[in-house]
DNA sequence: TATTAAATGATAATAATTTTCAATTACAAC
DNA sequence: GTTGTAATTGAAAATTATTATCATTTAATA
């Protein structure tokens, strides 16, 4: 499921957040790319059209959007955290350690394992992270 | 499988690295704790007995050890990267998002999924990361 | 429209790494 | 054992990523 701008605005307001022009632009920017983007990369793009929007606002907005599950936050090896839309359908990642390319995949269910762990440890499990790291086809040749 | 110091020395040399006193101390320090430690925490401990060893050496050593699979590097949410020994037996993590407590678990096999992904995408998959995030029992009460 | 809590942007602060470089050292070859 | 050399070290500076502060502005509700 992908969220319309109107839907996102509603969800933000439902949670006591305002739907500001700055946030709209960040959302549009993230949504307009298929890639996972770092906060800095998002800032760069936003900045071209809207030089008055600060990097801090990008960070703040991304935090909120990720918390509400409206975007997907990715913790990769090396320097952490990039973002993409489409988070609402839960999925996992395959990441190229050389060029950073990310492939999403879904349909792999960890709820049974989660339940087992929860029972065994008493943890209240809220989330999980499943990432495969390797070399994409292009980089396999290059890195040879 | 846990590595003896001698074994680690051999592996380092096999890969063209020297087995220096500094590295020996870092290895001992990591091995002497059951916890996952950040680079800074390791430095702190090393520094008490060996104030002449610099933080940069800690970073460099941890990088090498992780690359060779002699220690286990953990990417948690928030501020990334902590380390522990015993990496050689592959395992996964359950992490408390409040206090940072880490529970290792093993026996969950992802090789079938890995193979499927590899076939479908052409990736040469080298590694993966499976982490569950939640609240440990103690923190569930506290955070209430 | 008036009210007010939330958001913004500028700046500074903090934190976590990485780079540089001259001096030192492990270790393989003799 | 001595020597040669590439690897390593520590100190310092540089980068990078993120968070905190605070005065000003603004979205959303009444
Ligand atoms: Mn999942
Ligand atoms: Mn695994
Ligand atoms: Zn690649
Ligand atoms: Zn906890």
Image: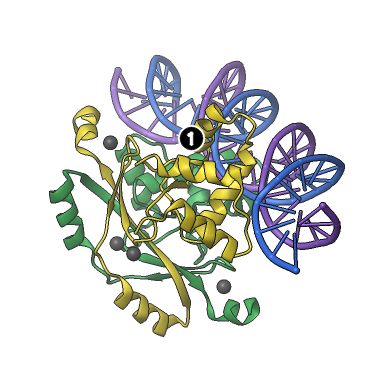
Chain colours: A yellow, B green, C purple, D blue
* Left or right relative to B74: residue B126: left
Q: Helix, strand or loop at disc 1? A: helix
Vertical relation: A124 (above or below) A30:
below
Residue B58, can we see it? no
The N terminus of chain A sits in image quarter: bottom left
> Number of marks in the image?
1
Q: Which residue is mark 1?
A: A41
Residue B49: image location, x then y, percent = 65, 52
Under 8 Å from ligand 3: the CB of mark 1? no
- Please tell me which residue lies in front, A18 or D4: A18
Q: Quadrant location of the C terminus of chain A?
A: top left
Q: Position of residue A116 (x, y in %)?
A: 34, 81
Whole-percent x and y of residue A98? Answer: 32, 36
Query: Residue B52 lies in what quarter of the image?
Result: top right
Camera-nearest residue between B132 and A104: A104
User: Is residue A99 at least partly visible in the picture?
Assistant: yes
Chain bearing tag 1 is A
Q: Quadrant of ligand 2?
A: bottom left
Where is A65 relative to B110, above or below?
above
- Residue plotted at (12% across, 50% down): B119
Location of residue B103 (image quadrant): bottom left
In the image, residue B92 sits, relative to residue A31, either above or below, namely below
- At 14% from the left and 50% from the top, the residue drawn is B120
Q: Nearer the viewer, residue A94 or A117?
A: A94
Position of residue A117 measured from the top left corner of the image (x, y, whole percent) = 38, 78
């Amino acid at each position: 499921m992908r969220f319309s701008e109107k839907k996102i605005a509603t969800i933000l307001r439902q949670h006591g957040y305002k739907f500001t022009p700055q946030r709209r632009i960040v959302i549009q920017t993230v949504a307009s790319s298929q890639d996972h983007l770092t906060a800095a990369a998002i800032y760069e793009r936003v900045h071209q059209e809207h030089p008055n929007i600060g990097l801090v606002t990008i960070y703040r907005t991304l935090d909120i959007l990720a918390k509400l599950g409206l975007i997907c936050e990715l913790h990769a090896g090396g320097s952490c955290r990039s973002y993409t839309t489409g988070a609402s359908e839960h999925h996992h990642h395959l990441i190229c350690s050389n060029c950073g390319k990310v492939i999403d995949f879904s349909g792999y269910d960890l709820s049974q394992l989660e339940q087992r762990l929860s029972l065994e440890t008493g943890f209240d499990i809220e989330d999980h992270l499943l990432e495969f790291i390797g070399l994409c086809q292009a980089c396999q040749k290059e890195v040879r």
